[in-house]
Image (cartoon, grey):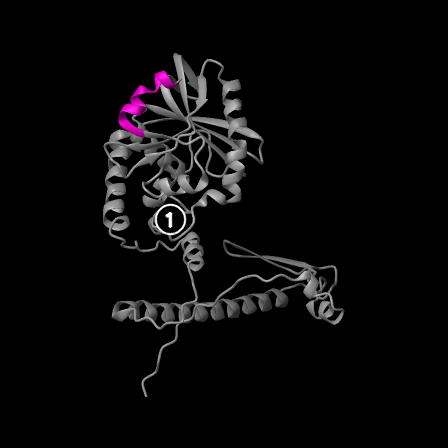
Amino acid sequence: MNNKCGELFDRCTAVPAADMDHEEWSSRRRQRIGGSDAGGVLGLSSYASPLTVYLEKKGLAPPKTGSPATRRGNLLEPAIRQFARDAFPDLIIEPFPYMLTSKAYPFMGANIDGVIFTEKHVSIGKQEITGLGGHEIKSSKSGYGFGEDEIPDAYYAQVQHYLGVTGLPWIVLSVYILDKEDVRHYPIYRNEEGFIADMIRREQDFWENFVVPGVMPAPLGLDAEEAMITGLFNGDSSALNLGIDASGMCAEYLELNKSIKDMEERKQAIAVEIKSLLLRNIPPEKPCLNPKANKISARAGSFSISWSRYDTKRVDTDALKRDGLFEGYSKTVESGQFRITEKKEA
């Protein structure tokens, strides 16, 4: 297959990755924007952002390579590749064990899972492929975001990034959905003017104006950002001066906290009022104190209301402590506290 991949090696610098250890692989990955970074840089991912990608590239946060989802994907990759071979016998499908770096845009890299070649015109779903293309392999627990003709935005960005680096005309994305035990294949053609050109411009801006000079991007408010930033906490007790700009954010934070508290209190008061109305409107022949009546349903205009009660079981920690069993069945979990207070003028 390598003799058919000449254009990839013409457009890119290729480093064999089959025998590369994890440390070298991670180091090389930090030196450019990869396909799995594209969705975060472009703001198209729920799990990554310019901030999280920046922290990874600067070596301030570990890459995602050790996550359970990543390990699962690595284990399933050969099987999913074989599923694709069995489904489309006219395609030659092989792994591609190289790390690619674009010669035109050295800040862009690609680690495609494989290459596909066919001299025939092969139909996959509503699309047709021929010649040389790429292969990207994914696994998904529930298949969320994978429809008949659609894939999650972050994966679309990843594939277009690979097409931008390699110059290939198309990539087939094969995904194994675990809960449905289903393998789906999505041919994706390069979208040069509609996506790739803008993507390259934005990735270059991110690399040259944030990563290279060491300027941390603003957060987008994702849970992934909170988790990554919290993981960088080192307990330094020195007092920092964040300046007047941060004071405005602190004031807004406190105001939002107060608003949330006020809204929660109002929400609770409304809930009590509605529950009282429910109790007052129960017909006498259906007493609400009947132990078997564990749910009340009602309507209010276009709204449906339900109020139910049920039993739950919880661990009695006091009893465990009395019996001397608590320590044997407890574990230490790291937690923290973030608090802002305002110093009142005397």
Range of the magenta residues?
2-13
Dot 1 lies on which element? helix
User: Residue 31, position in %: x, y?
Assistant: 32, 42
Dot 1: few (<14), some (14–19), or many (≥20) neighbours within 10 Å? many
Q: Of helix, strand and loop, which mostly describes the magenta segment?
A: helix
Badge 1 amino acid:
Glu
Q: Is residue 140 visible?
A: no
Q: Is residue 7 magenta?
A: yes
Q: In which quarter of the view is residue 16 placed?
A: top left
Q: Is residue 102 left or right of residue 174?
A: left
In this view, 76 is above or below 206 = above
User: Residue 6, position in %: x, y?
Assistant: 31, 20
Residue bearing the label numbered 1: 56
- Residue found at x 71% / y 70%: 321
User: Residue 187, position in %: x, y?
Assistant: 40, 25
Seen as rendered, the residue at the extreme right is 323
Q: In which quarter of the view is residue 316 placed?
A: bottom right
- Residue found at x 38% / y 55%: 221
